Amino acid sequence: MKEIKFKISYRKGDADGGRLDMYDASTSLQGFAKALSITTHAMLNDGEIKKKGNRIEGAKLYIHPSRKGSFEELLTLAIEEKVALSIGASVVANVFYDLIKWTWSQTLDKTYEPSTPQVKKLRDRVEPFIGEMEEALEIPLEQAHRPIKQNENMTISIVRSKVGDIVTLDQNTLKSVSLSTESNLITGITGNVTRFNILSGFGRFYDDSLDKTVSFKLQDCVTSNQKQWFPWSMYHAQNGDGGKIQLEVKRVMSAKGAVKRYLVYGVTEVKS
């Protein structure tokens, strides 16, 4: 087994006295367990995203007794030897932390670019790995913030030994995973598809009016004929000869007022 040891550190508020509300703490740890399992499974299984987050193929995640006088949870990720070797036993820890920092930062609206070749490969896929990963992580990471909902000064960090904080949750990151879906349909969202997975229905869309790229997810009402517009748009955009389409969407919004995702209910071509 290749073991990676790290900790979850709760700071300020009741945590400074070495205690937390039991319900808040258990909800937070359950959220971390799901988020860590989802992320680790993707690392060990070529980017496969398991949204339930209750089992890792190729590894186990263990929790140790808390240290007296602080509120820190000590964890060990035990990776099967042959699985660790497939990534590289000497670099698997770096890949693990890099993937956490990249995927969790994206979900929490923080800026971070991956540094390891293994994570860069996931970033550069034609299929929009990060959009689907963000959706999988949003609810677990909201749960992980639970003590912060009760004490806005508290922070919670994933801490790597001898390095320090990898990702820190606070009142600001809580707003990034506190999501709501608008009830009204918006039409005329014009732009180009930049990435698309026809199997999952996830993609990335360059919105002309926002002048930026937004994740999207096709809804069940989108027909098979309509789905063909998405690879068509991506192909023509890459070749620089149009490919404009218009979407009919509901917006998933964060508590910050930022657009997190478009839920797509319809699509039409933009006539030139």
Image (cartoon, grey):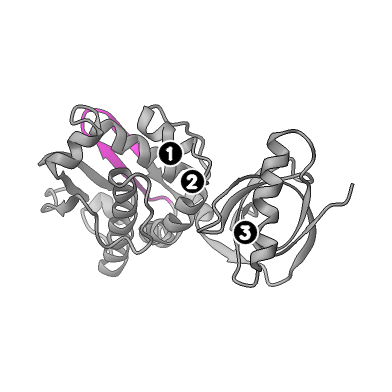
The residue that mark 2 highlights is: 130
Question: Between marks 1 and 2, how big is the CA–CA gap?
Answer: 8 Å
Residue 117 in the image: state x and y as whole percent: 38, 28
Q: Secondary structure at mark 1?
A: helix
Observer-side mark, 1 or 2, equals 1
Q: Residues at badges 3 and 2 in contact (C-beta under 8 Å)?
A: no
User: Considering depth in this image, is 206 or 169 the residue closer to the camera?
Assistant: 206
The amino acid beneath tag 1 is Leu
The amino acid beneath tag 3 is Met
Residue 246 in the image: state x and y as whole percent: 78, 55
Seen at 29% across and 69% down, the residue is 23
- Residue 11 visible in the picture: no
Count residues near mark 1 (Cα–Cα under 10 Å), then give few for <14, some for 14-19, many for 20+.
some
The residue that mark 3 highlights is: 253
Count residues near mark 2 (Cα–Cα under 10 Å), then give few for <14, some for 14-19, many for 20+.
many
Instruction: Compare marks 1 and 3 and give the one earlier in the sequence.
Output: 1
